[in-house]
Amino acid sequence: MELKPLKIGKYIIEKPIIQGGMGVGISWDNLAGNVSKEGGLGVISAVGTGIYKNRKFAKKVMGEGRPYEAENFYCRDALFEIFKNARAICGDRPLGVNILYAINDYDRVVKDACEAGANIIITGAGLPLTMPEAAKEFSDVALVPIVSTAKALKILCRRWEKTHKRLPDAVIVEGPLSGGHQGFKYEECFKEENQLENILPPIVEEAKRWGDIPVIAAGGIWDKNDIIRMLKLGASGVQMGTRFIGTYECDASDEFKQVLLNAKKEDIKLFKSPVGYPARGVETNLHKLIREGKAPKIKCISNCVAPCKRGEEAKMVGYCIADSLSDAYDGKLDTGLFFTGSNGYRLNEIISVKELMEKLINGE
């Protein structure tokens, strides 16, 4: 089966593979730039840009390198630098950004990303009903929400059409095998009816009711066989995150990559998160510290996500997500939170983005 180019808004993605946006610092300029260079869609994560380049762009940083408040955790100057460096790699090929709907300063970060040069904005972690309002000044920027049910897509399309006179340029369907935050409650992630192959076809049908909206499948996709399987179910393309961690160009620390290379299947679990959704990652020393009541003290310096309620939810689950993801990026094995999809244990080598894209397209 031929892998045809993927059209999102006015942009053509030569190879129908979107690299998932992974924060903090897993997909920034080097990874996203190289994925776009090789014909896929590279996606910069807008999460935690304040720690980019050893925090030199953040205007205020507290002890242990924590960017102070959302304006520094989601640092505009750093985001601009990341886009500039990614563009130096991929030129004028399409380049995307992932901005979580649950973050504080969502509208401001969307505008920052548009001004920095994003062609496509992807948003999940909540149903982004106001996404078009945030990007209203940038008509050329394609908007791609992430949903997990046909009902959610229907609600979103109705609202967008009524309030903003527009529809999504594409939609990503994320099943519960993805890394990071899920679109289902904990117990719902294990139900057969919520698995990607079962939620994808109804969403494809719902998308057709609203016109020619491309549907992109995500969550647990590993190789060309998986890609073909999703295309046969009606998807126009796929989004993949975890496999791109296993590349030289991935912006993650060497320690982060090694955690995944060392992980066994049973090490990858769903955890509670201050964001309000379950999240998948590798069980590491942080979770041992949480169980023992010895995890780092929660201070809520960055004020990163609205659902956390200024650290209240973090105290309930036992860790600050901004601090823990930042520690993983910094390679701190004792306190880092290492997100991965359900297939993370299958990573057994580090290869180039070029080689990975060739494997995905040719099935090697």
Image: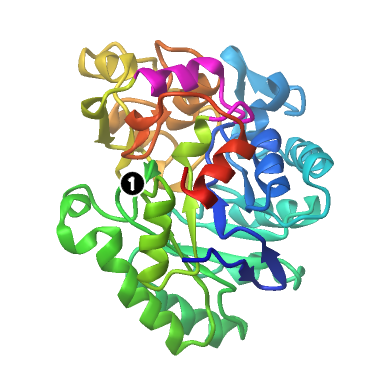
**Residue at the spot of label 1:** 276
Can the viewer see residue 151?
A: no
Element assignment for label 1: loop
Query: Does residue 347 appear left or right of residue 250 in this picture?
Result: left
Q: Residue at x 55, y 69 (%)?
A: 130
Where residue 85 appears, as percent x and y from the top left, is 80, 37
In magenta, the rendered stretch is 247-262
Q: Residue at x 54, y 52 (%)?
A: 361
Where residue 176 appears, as percent x and y from the top left, is 30, 51
Q: Is 92 located above or below residue 6 in the figure?
A: above
Magenta span includes 216? no
Q: Is 174 located above or below residue 29 in the figure?
A: below
Q: Is 139 located above or below residue 300 in the figure?
A: below
Front position in the image: 130 or 330? 330
Can the viewer see residue 112?
A: yes
Quarter holding residue 343:
top left
Q: Residue at x 48, y 27 (%)?
A: 325
Magenta span includes 251? yes
